[in-house]
């Protein structure tokens, strides 16, 4: 899809389809967090807000179609000319709020996974930048014209911000924050002492946000067309479609790393090791720092799909008679020690199996 014209029906079809996909991913995420791993957090609250705003955004798009988006502005009756621009105005600031909430969810998810102090400081800085950016874009779109009604009612004299410089500045900042969100966890993931295959898989999962960057860039062409257009209802459909795709892809990218537990519950054989019949990937991954920065621990939890009792899990009660917690510690050795006899390699990793029963402090 380029910056060419699209009919109103295409706007409805695309926005509804992507919103439904994002909604399903959000439901699966919440099911996983609340009923499988029992570890819901503030990042889940953020994604719920983003999803609700995405639904509102879709509603504003559908209302624009109802009042004539995709048709020439001068072909609309005076009442529809006002209504379509009112809903267009609403869609702009809802879009920015939804995008900001989706990005915050991704960063908050990083904070609950990675314990490294420097990385966490970088996340807090990025959260602050996204917060300032979202506040600016919200206010600049909400008050794009003063008085506000002059945005949709051409009979009201007012002063409006120049669309081209403001919208493209916002788009550029949006792409910068997208890139930062994708890049920031990669050095930490690269430094993990994991098998190469697992490390690559983790980097791919956390790098999925790059898709949002691509969508943001593709949106620029349609954004330019609408920012210089006099016939805004004719030129707006493509910008509306790309905006909806961008928000919902952001939600999808935030949800995908959390969906393994839900998929494993629905398709129990999907993630099982063919040789052992056991889950090959844990439902959740938590990285905890080791002593003196020389090693790290990766704690993983696999949850039985059939609860048989109650057990304690991190201060919470889980539906398990026995909780199995696997802890793997891998020490980072000096290169000289790595050249030692391969028989000593077994000391590089220690695998501990801890069985926790209700009322047992161990």
Image (cartoon, rainbow, N blue to C red):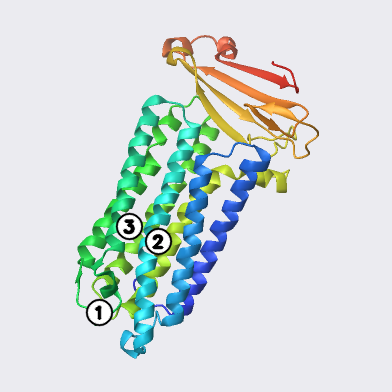
Precedes in sequence: disc 2 or disc 1: 2
Q: Mark 1: which secondary structure?
A: loop
Q: Mark 2: which secondary structure?
A: helix
Left of 319 or right of it: where is 48? left
Residue 346 higher or lower than 136, as above or below: above
Frontmost residue, 297 versus 350: 297
Residue at image mark 1: 230
Q: Position of residue 272 (x, y in %)?
A: 70, 38
Q: Mark 3: which secondary structure?
A: helix
* Foreground label between 2 and 1: 2
Precedes in sequence: disc 3 or disc 2: 2
Residue occupying image coordinates x 66% and y 47%: 263
Residue occupying image coordinates x 42% and y 26%: 116
- Quadrant of the image containing the C terminus: top right
Residue at image mark 3: 138
Marks 3/2: CA–CA distance:
8 Å
Frontmost residue, 205 versus 24: 24
Q: Is residue 175 visible?
A: no
- Quadrant of the image containing the N terminus: bottom left
Q: Which label is found at residue 94?
A: 2
Left of 47 or right of it: where is 304? right
Left of 189 or right of it: where is 260? right
């Amino acid at each position: 899809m380029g910056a060419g014209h699209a009919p109103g029906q295409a706007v409805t079809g695309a926005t509804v389809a992507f919103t439904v996909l994002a909604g399903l991913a959000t439901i699966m995420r919440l099911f996983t967090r609340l009923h499988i791993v029992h570890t819901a957090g503030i990042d889940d609250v953020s994604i719920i807000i983003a999803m609700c705003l995405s639904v509102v955004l879709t509603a504003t798009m559908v209302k624009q179609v109802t009042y004539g988006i995709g048709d020439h502005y001068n072909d609309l009756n005076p009442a529809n000319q006002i209504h379509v621009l009112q809903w267009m105005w609403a869609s702009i600031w809802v879009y920015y709020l939804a995008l900001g909430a989706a990005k915050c969810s991704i960063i908050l998810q990083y904070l609950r996974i990675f314990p490294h102090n420097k990385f966490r400081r970088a996340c807090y800085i990025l959260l602050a930048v996204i917060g300032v950016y979202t506040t600016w874009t919200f206010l600049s779109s909400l008050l794009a014209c003063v008085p506000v009604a002059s945005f949709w009612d051409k009979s009201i004299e007012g002063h409006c911000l120049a669309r081209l410089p403001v919208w493209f500045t916002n788009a550029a900042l949006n792409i910068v924050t997208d890139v930062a969100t994708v890049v920031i966890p990669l050095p930490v993931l690269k430094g993990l002492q994991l098998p190469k295959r697992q490390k690559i898989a983790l980097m791919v999962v956390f790098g999925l946000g790059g898709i949002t960057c691509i969508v943001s860039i593709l949106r620029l062409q349609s954004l330019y067309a609408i920012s210089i257009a006099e016939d805004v209802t004719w030129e707006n459909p493509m910008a509306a479609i790309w905006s909806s795709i961008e928000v919902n892809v952001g939600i999808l990218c935030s949800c995908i790393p959390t969906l393994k537990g839900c998929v494993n519950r629905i398709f129990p054989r999907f993630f099982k090791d063919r040789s052992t019949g056991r889950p090959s990937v844990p439902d959740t991954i938590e990285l905890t720092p080791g002593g003196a920065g020389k090693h790290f621990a990766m704690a993983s939890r696999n949850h039985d799909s059939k609860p048989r009792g109650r057990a304690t899990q991190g201060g919470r009660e889980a539906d398990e008679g026995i909780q199995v917690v696997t802890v793997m510690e891998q020490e980072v050795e000096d290169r000289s020690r790595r050249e030692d006899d391969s028989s000593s390699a077994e000391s590089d990793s220690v695998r501990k199996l801890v069985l926790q029963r209700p009322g047992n402090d161990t």
